[in-house]
Amino acid sequence: MKKWPVVVIVCLAAVIFGGFAGLLYWNFSDLPEIRQLEIYKPLETSVVYSSDNKVLAEFYLERRIFIQHFNIPARLKNAFIAIEDERFYSHPGVDMIGIIRALVKDIMAGGIVEGGSTITQQLAKMLFLKSERSLSRKIKEAVLSAQIERRYTKDEILGMYMNQAYFGTRAYGIEAAAQTYFNKSAVNLDVAEAAMLAGLTKAPSVYSPFKNPEKALNRRQLVLKKMLANKFITTEEYEKARTEPLPPSPYFRKYEAPYFVEHLRQQLESKYNDQVYTSGLKIVSTIDYGMQKTAEEAVKKGIESVQKRVKPTVQAALVAIDLQTGQIKALVGGTDFWVTQYNRATMALRQPGSAFKPIVYATALQEGYEPDDTIADGPIVFPGSRPGAKWSPKNYDGKFHGIVTLKKAIALSLNTATVRLAHQVGVDKIIATARKAGIRSVMQPYLPIALGASDVTLMELTAAYGSFATGKKIEPLTYEKILNRDGLLIEEVFPYQTEAFSEDVVEGMKTLLAEVVNSGTAVQAKSLKRPVYGKTGTTNDFSDAWFIGFDDRFVVGVWVGRDNHKPIGNKEAGARAALPIWIDFMKSLQ
């Protein structure tokens, strides 16, 4: 037999070794750094809370709520170990016994029926590798698993896996899965619930209890049998768990205060971009949960009353703002957010009608007028909008009242007296007053502005009335503070109010608006039996009905109307359509 020269053998060995080394380098040169896990931050749901710590909403791309591994109960961990990786606590990241067993079963079945991947390998694949089936990926997976096992404890690895896994129905991680499938925290899951969730990760859509209940039940029973075989549960626990029903439908959290939450979301998105959906922020909003529920009920009750008198599709909105802080404490943007998301409190530009008149009277007070000064309420004619045309405002009842005080003029909402006053003080100054009070919408520089001819939003007009109460320009606030996923403060919002009106003007406005309640169009509000101030508003064709008013703590605005600007109904003025909602809400604040 011919012998190979030593030099040839050495060269051949060098080629083989070099090729093998090259293969290893090619496979492992692009392996990610395991130390990246030290800064691992999964996409996590941000949660919005009310000021009294009620959950209002969640913002997410992947619905995930991170839970620390030491808070995951043993029965839940054991369910995953039983079905996914029975030797999890004993193998070094790759389970050779499991691989051999899976290989034998696959050969006997003539195809792949069981995988040999450990929980650590699955974590490595989820975090670092693509889902392709190849020898190269399996080698990388094994190497990464060994590195993960050297750096982290078994419980830390299991916790990362359970927080990262997808459970179907838009639920990522065990905590979101527990809430989605059972409407409870993962720490409160029983044995049957834990077994069902553990069975989902293999194929969430296949084993979904909502899509394939029979397959889901069989899968859960398999997990329970494995838990029993591994002595994770007793026979009694097994028998009880196997008879429990599957969840009938998912639990998707609907927004509380939905119009407010959507308004807040848009604000936060413009400032924090995708962090709102991915960073697990805790957002403490300004909403008072009890006041919000009262506001929603007042709107519902008020619209039901209106729609007994008129055709359907009437809408309403309500805003309540804390006078001292500017915080929005309640916001209703319509009768049903889940039917229409159009926010009539913040987005709808509507004519305020007589609800704008206090701006005229505030301007007069700044010019030196007093509440008991007089103005003529009689026929008056101004040039119209077209050449040769005339504009002659009329009062609601078609009557004139002669010489009246400013108190009486605003209390009875006299149009001719108010337009005459507006003419005397000047339209430019009225617009300047509106700006000082916080109105940002476009103001038409013509006399009909005195009767509310320029569109405004409910939010800005309500805030403007707040300046009559305090003398400060109010910037409505939607949140108090934002914390990161670790509970550290990112942002805290403090009230920001600038001087708008002097104390004399504030006292004068309170005198005028109190007269509206005591002897004018809002006399129904006397039923509150405490000092309140406000003004009704109605457009000519009854398409908009308003009441905006305040007490010593809150300014509250209500609007009623139709989205298509058609009339609400005959005689559906502010005092009839909007004021009852305002009164109903204000009763709760006593």
Image (tube, rainbow, N blue to C red):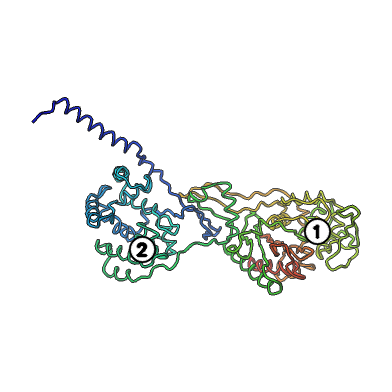
Q: Earlier in the sequence, mark 1 or mark 2?
A: 2
Q: Residue furthest front?
A: 1
Q: Is residue 259 visible?
A: yes
Residue drawn at the location 36% of the way across and 52% of the way down:
161
Marking on residue 54: none
Provide the residue designation for mark 1: 451
The picture places residue 318, in percent across and down from the top left corner, at 66, 62
Secondary structure of the residue carrying tag 2 is: helix
The picture places residue 186, in percent across and down from the top left corner, at 39, 60
Nearer the observer, 121 or 401: 121
Amino acid type at image mark 1: Leu
Task: Place residue 523 in its image quadrant.
Answer: bottom right
Q: Residues within 10 Å of mark 2 (few under 14, many from 20)?
A: many
* Left or right of residue 127: residue 395: right
Provide the residue designation for mark 2: 196
Q: Residue furthest left?
A: 1
Nearer the observer, 129 or 456: 129
* Left or right of residue 468: residue 395: right
Secondary structure of the residue carrying tag 1 is: helix
The picture places residue 316, in percent across and down from the top left corner, at 67, 64
The picture places residue 400, in percent across and down from the top left corner, at 89, 66
* 141 shown above or below 80: above
Residue drawn at the location 63% of the way across and 67% of the way down:
588
Q: Is residue 558 visible?
A: no
* Left or right of residue 291: residue 450: right
Amino acid type at image mark 2: Met
> Marks 1/2: CA distance?
65 Å
What is the quadrant of the N terminus in the image?
A: top left
